[in-house]
Amino acid sequence: MRRDVGLVPAFLVAVAAAAGAQAPSDSAPGPPRLSVSLARDADGALRPPLVRATGALVGGAFGGALHDGFPVRYHFRLELRRSVRILPDRLEGDVEWDAVVLLDPLTEEYDLVRSGGSAEHFPSAAGLQRALSVPFTVDLMPRGRDQYYYLATLEIESLSLSELDEAERWLSGEFGPAIARRGDVGEALGRGVRRLLVRLSGLPRLRLESRSPFFRP
């Protein structure tokens, strides 16, 4: 059962305080990393999972692509899976959300647009880095008493030339209805076609994956 961020914004709640306490150092950012963490409250009840991406997400090849005029897209997906003996694990639900980064080559300032159309502006890469590292609380909880785990994935890729105009129109709100229906800017043109264009263009791509420990609610 897939649930889109654009349909239920409450699925994603940015934890700003946690970001301030755990943001990576601006002077020595590490490699891109993705994590999904679990915690319980004082009564032992399971809390919603936290998904966090850290590292030099705007550096290296992606930083070069930004300076060459290519937006960079971050596509997150969190799956809740039920562990089943012998049989393949069962997908119980999933949530997807996106962010797109653009760089103004004249001012060297960044824009960050998230699913649903919310936009932020950053005068420096350090500020953008901190924003991208803010963890999200994802409202995707098991309903049974079986054994479960979470699987988080993050796909980072530069948008192809044919999608540059799409990203600009999305920033202006033209794609608002499509995002509200599907919660994914890439799906407005078709994710399969987009991935093919990115592969053919030779633009950078990166996929990260993280799995939580097994748990019971």
Image: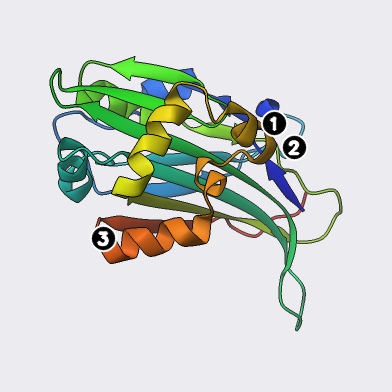
Whole-percent x, y for residue 166 in the image:
42, 37
Residue drawn at point x = 71 percent, y = 42 percent:
140
Residue type, label 1: Asp
Q: Which numbered disc flags the more N-terminal residue, 3 or 1?
A: 1
Asked if residue 82 shows in the view, the reply is yes
Foreground of the two, 46 or 192: 192
- CA separation in Å, label 2 and label 1: 5 Å
Residue type, label 2: Gly
Q: Name the outermost residue toward the bottom.
A: 86
Per the image, the residue denoted by label 2 is 44
Residue type, label 3: Ser
Per the image, the residue denoted by label 3 is 201
- Name the disc covering residue 80, or none: none
Task: Locate residue 43 relative to residue 179 in the image: left or right.
Answer: right
Task: Locate residue 181 relative to residue 134 in the image: left or right.
Answer: right
Whole-percent x, y for residue 72 in the image:
32, 41
Per the image, the residue denoted by label 1 is 41
Task: Locate residue 77 relative to residue 22 in the image: left or right.
Answer: right
Residue drawn at point x = 72 percent, y = 30 percent:
8
Vertical side of 173 occupied by 163: above or below: below
Task: Give SS at disc 1.
Answer: loop
Q: Which of marks 3 and 1 is in front?
A: 3
